[in-house]
Amino acid sequence: MNDGSSAGLVRPSPMTAGGLDISGVTVRFGGLTALDDVSLGAAPRQVTGIIGPNGAGKTTLLNAACGFVKPQSGTIFFDSRELTGLRPHRLAGLGVARTLQGVGLFRGLSAVENVMVGASQTARAGFWSGFFGLPRSDRDERRLRERALQALGRVGASDLADSMPETLAYGLRKRVALARALVGQPRLLLLDEPASGLSEKELPELGDLIKSLAADAAVVVIEHRMDLVMSVCDTIFVLDFGKLIATGPPEQVQADPAVTAAYLGAEESATTQSAGTEGAGTEGAGQGAGADGAAKGRAEERATAAAEAEEADRE
């Protein structure tokens, strides 16, 4: 990390109420290091961005925080509770919610029913009440439906409540998936590429929504749309090949030479690789230039697959 960036580091301690603290996390897949001694934090009531070229380790970091990947070393705390090694199904009860790169909605359930699934941990009626159709179960279902409708309204999707996911455009399904994450009223919200599939015209509205969510939670955003990241984030962390190379407010990160070099290097590698496919004589050079980034990307994709396999099947 460059000296200018580290001087602006702002992150809560593990004991800060509502804060996320990731300290010294290292993740390896075989002989490949996906994350190398990464430390960063997300303060409550702020939007924290995590950016970097493809294969930098961004999604692997979220997978580690959510229990889908076990770090070889390091600790992860949220609101004074250690998340390291915690089973993913326990996160909702701790006030943690995450959206995935794939929307993962259930076929056969309407949009509002999909969102209701996200509030299931708050259900009061037990299995037998629902099985026998007791009045308490009916009241509970009405309460969950009302919460789901409110969450859909918050993301501007109230009119989609009775729609089936397979009939909706990808951008609309992303809204429903975000509503499902919000319905549980999380205190830590992890958003993995929320702008993917959205048009440029939709970005300002999404940016306003993300900033409003920080009023109630610590919000962490992984995103490739730099205009969105720079407009909504209070603090940005930059990863490159698994290492943290820069930290600071948007304007500082945007002007950081290390960040510029990381992104330009990624673009040059991709250009070289593309050029190498034009002729057999230059194919080896193109593949060699992009091999390291491609290998890192494949490792991160394998880690993400473990988290998203079930959701992808439901799609």
Image (cartoon, rainbow, N blue to C red):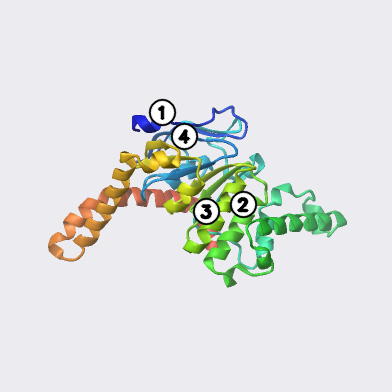
Q: Residues within 10 Å of mark 2 (few under 14, many from 20)?
A: many
Q: Which mark is residue 7?
A: 1
Name which residue type carries label 3.
Leu
Name which residue type carries label 4.
Leu
The reply to whether residue 315 is visible in this rendering is no
Q: Which residue is mark 3?
A: 100
Mark 3 vs mark 4: which is more N-terminal?
Answer: 4
Mark 3 vs mark 2: which is more N-terminal?
Answer: 3
Q: Label 2, label 1: how many angstroms apart (C-alpha)?
A: 34 Å
The residue positioned 63% from the left and 56% from the top of the image is 179
In the rendered image, residue 105, in percent from the top left (x then y), is placed at 59, 61
Name which residue type carries label 1.
Ala
Q: Which residue is mark 2?
A: 181
Q: Secondary structure at mark 2?
A: helix
Q: Label 1, label 4: how many angstroms apart (C-alpha)?
A: 13 Å
In the rendered image, residue 220, in percent from the top left (x then y), is placed at 52, 44
Mark 1 vs mark 4: which is more N-terminal?
Answer: 1
The residue positioned 59% from the left and 52% from the top of the image is 209
Disc 1, disc 4: CB below 8 Å?
A: no
